[in-house]
Amino acid sequence: MVDEPTGGGNPNFFKIFKGAYLHAPSPEAIFTSAKLMLSCVNDVQFMGDCMVMGYTPGAALTVLPPECRPPTEVRIPVVVDTKLDVLAVQTNGTVSLNATTDGMVYLSGVSFNISSNWYSN
């Protein structure tokens, strides 16, 4: 885990996030933030957008840390500039787009749930 989201504040205060994590962007993808937030109900949220140029469909944009990976593949509709695309999050943490797209991938605030990890421990 990168750091405590509360900055180590009052340990008796209710926390909605388990923590902040870093993903590993590929050299072809420029992210405005490499942080992810993981909530106590296993929502994973991107904290930044991504710029891609000359993108090849299915190529990795980034790889998520093990704590934020889904147990089954997740597909999320996202906007790239003014077009709709599909973001795939694989079980190995690889995040990719479905189409050949150039431009800004608006991911800031996009989230998905890994709720089947809830009872995995």
Image: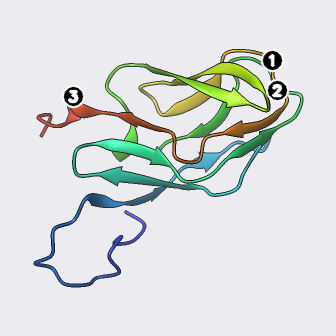
Residue at position x 11%, y 35% from top? Answer: 119
> Residue 119, relative to residue 3: is it above or below?
above
Of the 4 image quadrants, the one containing the C terminus is: top left
Of the 4 image quadrants, the one containing the N terminus is: bottom left
The percent coordinates of residue 55 (x first, y second) are 82, 26
* Circle 3 residue: 116
* Circle 1 residue: 100
Mark 1 or mark 2: whose residue is earlier in sequence = 2
Q: Can the viewer see residue 90?
A: yes
Residue 51 occupies which quadrant of the picture?
top right
* Circle 2 residue: 55
Q: Residue furthest bottom?
A: 9
Instruction: Answer few, some or many: residues within 10 Å of disc 2's Cα (few below 14, many 20 plus, some between 14 and 19).
Output: some
Report, in whole angstroms, how far the alpha carbon at label 1 lies from the one at label 2.
6 Å
Residue 27 occupies which quadrant of the picture?
top right
Instruction: Answer few, some or many: residues within 10 Å of disc 3's Cα (few below 14, many 20 plus, some between 14 and 19).
Output: few
Mark 3 secondary-structure assignment: helix
The percent coordinates of residue 89 (x first, y second) are 50, 27
Q: Is 119 or 10 nearer to us in this picture?
A: 10
Instruction: Answer few, some or many: residues within 10 Å of disc 1's Cα (few below 14, many 20 plus, some between 14 and 19).
Output: some
> Is residue 13 left or right of 45 when viewed as pictured?
left
Mark 1 or mark 3: whose residue is earlier in sequence = 1
Mark 2 secondary-structure assignment: loop
Mark 2 or mark 3: whose residue is earlier in sequence = 2
Q: Can the viewer see residue 66?
A: no
Mark 1 secondary-structure assignment: loop
Residue at position x 34%, y 61% from top? Answer: 19
Task: Evaluate if marks 1 and 2 touch, with contact meaning CB atoms under 8 Å apart.
Answer: yes
Amino acid under disc 3: Ser
Residue 14 occupies which quadrant of the picture?
bottom left
